[in-house]
Amino acid sequence: MTETESGYLAIVMIVAIVFSSRLAGYLLGSRISADGPVRKLFDVLPGCAIAAVIAPVIVRAGPVEIGALLVASCLLWLTSNIGLALASGLLLLIAGSHLMAGL
């Protein structure tokens, strides 16, 4: 198999996996009762996914990253404005990295 063929095969496999997982979620999701234990599990999955992505970053984070995360978290908690929290955290992260690079 050539490199081009293996690239095309990889793309086809990714499309098939994504499509089949979304189709399965759609078909199985309609069978889950609104009050069942599986529904409660699905309700907490987004938070678990975010924690799984953020936890390794926090472990390796420096003072600038921790500060940006704390500011963004506090603003999100106080204002419930995701855009404001995200923008302030990113601005603090960018400014802090530039200041630390100059030292």
Image: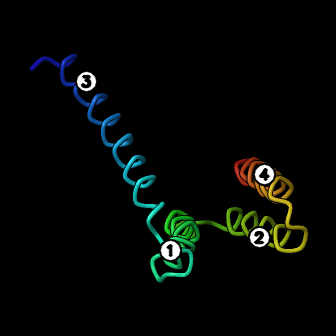
Do the residues under discs 2 and 3 have CB atoms within 8 angstroms? no
Say which mark, if any, is on residue 7.
Answer: 3
Q: Nearer the viewer, residue 29 or 13?
A: 29
On residue 99, the disc is: 4
Mark nearest the camera among 4 and 3 is: 3
The answer to the question of whether label 4 and label 2 lie on touching residues, with beta carbons closer than 8 A, is no
Residue type, mark 1 in image: Ser
In front: 102, or 74?
74
Cα distance between the residues tagged 3 and 1: 41 Å
- What is the C-alpha distance between the residues marked 1 and 4? 53 Å
Kind of residue sitting beneath label 4: Leu
Residue that numbered label 2 is attached to: 73
Q: Secondary structure at mark 4?
A: helix
Give the percent coordinates (x, y) of residue 41: 49, 77
Identify the amino acid type marked 2.
Answer: Ser
Q: Residue at x 41, y 54 (%)?
A: 27
Side of 102 relative to 61 (left or right): right
Query: Eyeballing the image, is 55 above or below 81?
Result: below
Does label 4 or label 3 sit earlier along the sequence? 3
Relative to residue 79, is residue 19 depicted above or below?
A: above
Q: Which amino acid does the dot numbered 3 rest on?
A: Gly
Q: Badge 1 is on which residue? A: 33
Alpha-carbon neighbours of circle 3 within 10 Å: few (<14), some, or many (≥20)?
few
Q: Secondary structure at mark 2?
A: helix
Name the residue furthest left: 1
Q: Return the disc, 2 or 1, that comes first in the chain's sequence.
A: 1
Q: Is residue 85 left or right of residue 4?
A: right
Q: Secondary structure at mark 1?
A: loop
Q: Residue at point 46% right, 61% down?
A: 29
